[in-house]
Image (cartoon, grey):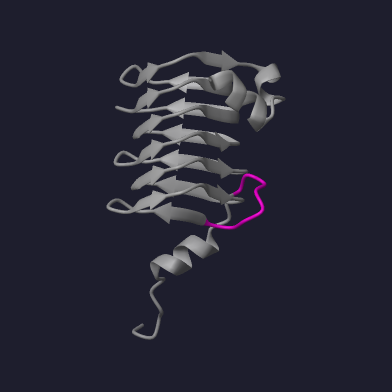
Amino acid sequence: MFNTKKPTTTDMITEKPNGNGGGGTGTTLISAGTTIKGDLSSNSDLRIDGTVIGNINSSAKIVIGNSGVVEGDIFGNNADIVGKTSGTIKVKELLQLRGECVVNGNIYAGKLQVEPSATFNGQCHMGANVVDMGSNEVASLAK
């Protein structure tokens, strides 16, 4: 009864598979109150509740939480945005703009879901031809 080990935060993160075919297991978390300046690259899921000033590239899912702020371009398989972003967003599959999110910049997505309370200012490009575009092509179109 008293000998059972309670899982720590690290245990919970590393034991959860991301389930989307990405190369990693678990989720990388940038917590509220944390600011990172520079580009991020990951093969596993990312959750950002802090601030990132730089580009984000993930072969899995990217979640920008309610307190999350990203100033830079976002490239991923799937993305779920609840916080604030400014920059180009390119998602191969599903991009969800949820809650009170504020997105300033162009988006390129295979599929897009926008909640009524979300704010989006920019151009939207959707469909299979967008999925086939490389990161360099998207960057040149965003200029």
Q: Is residue 23 magenta?
A: yes
Q: Is residue 111 visible?
A: no
Seen from this angle, which residue lies furthest bottom? 3
Q: Is residue 105 above or below residue 33?
A: above
Work out whether residue 105 or residue 18 is closer to the camera in this orientation and state it: 105
Work out whether residue 140 or residue 65 is closer to the camera in this orientation and state it: 140
Percent across and percent down for residue 10 are 44, 67
Percent across and percent down for residue 42 are 58, 51
Percent across and percent down for residue 127 are 64, 16
Determine the residue positioned at 46% across, 49% down.
38
Determine the residue positioned at 69% across, 25% down.
133
Work out whether residue 1 or residue 10 is closer to the camera in this orientation and state it: 10
Determine the residue positioned at 46% across, 27% down.
96
The image quadrant of residue 135 is: top right
Q: Chief secondary structure of the magenta span?
A: loop
Instruction: Tell me which segment is drawn in magenta.
Output: 19-26
Q: Is residue 77 visible?
A: yes
Q: Is residue 113 magenta?
A: no
Percent across and percent down for residue 53 are 40, 43
Work out whether residue 102 or residue 20 is closer to the camera in this orientation and state it: 102
- 66 to the left or right of 74: left
